[in-house]
Amino acid sequence: MPNDVKTLEHMTLDLDHFLPYRLSILSNRASDAIARHYSDRFGLSVPEWRVMAVLGQTPGMSARDVAQRTAMDKVQVSRAVASLVDARRVNREGDETDGRVTRLSLTAKGQAIYDEVVPLALHLEEVFLAALTPDERKTLNRLMDKLTDRISHLHVIPGQSE
């Protein structure tokens, strides 16, 4: 076993300073804060709203596409889609060129909810980001993009080069 792996085994993890943990907590808290505003009113879960948000922006996606776009688990997306279809908020239609694929889109009822939630979500985002100056917002966006591009390198094992 390489020496640097052995050294890493004896290190402790301080969650309060561990970036993936902090990002997860921040993301969950932001999603929960927004969800409180639409869950009671529309009976939507966070995964259901994420599916609706993606379909509101890009109708005709498959559930697999939605899962990739949202980085949600396929089972979570499947359950959210099933619930939204049952509630007549999302339509499923077969793909014209590939019978194995189902395309998703918002129904009129789903679009009406989307149209109400989007301004609310954008307002809450603005309230949240008001803690940052315009320059800090630009920097945050730039850093988020940079980290998003870098995430594919997380498969690297300590002690091995990229």
Image (spheres, rainbow, N blue to C red):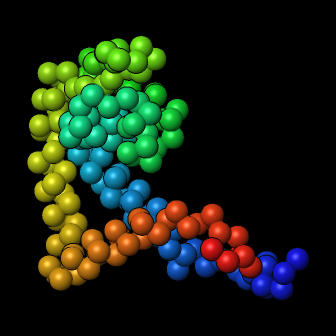
Q: How many marks?
A: 0
Residue 137: x %, y % from top left: 21, 75
Q: Is residue 44 visible?
A: no
Whether 37 is drawn above or below 22: the answer is above
Residue 162: x %, y % from top left: 63, 74
Residue at the extreme right: 1
- Give the left or right position of residue 17, taking residue 46 as reference: right
Residue at the extreme front: 97
Whether 159 is drawn above or below 62: the answer is below
Q: Quadrant of residue 6?
A: bottom right
Q: Quadrant of residue 108?
A: top left
Please tell me which residue lies in front, 98 or 157: 98
- Give the left or right position of residue 117, taking residue 94 as reference: left
Q: Is residue 17 visible?
A: yes
Please tell me which residue lies in front, 6 or 44: 6
The residue at 33%/23% (across/down) is: 103
Residue 110: x %, y % from top left: 20, 26
Residue 3: x %, y % from top left: 83, 85
The residue at 31%/25% (across/down) is: 104
Q: Quadrant of residue 153?
A: bottom right
Question: Which quadrant, please, contains the N terminus?
Answer: bottom right
Whether 36 is drawn above or below 84: the answer is below
- Give the left or right position of residue 118, taking residue 105 as reference: left
Whether 148 is drawn above or below 7: the answer is above
The residue at 55%/75% (across/down) is: 18
The residue at 34%/75% (across/down) is: 143
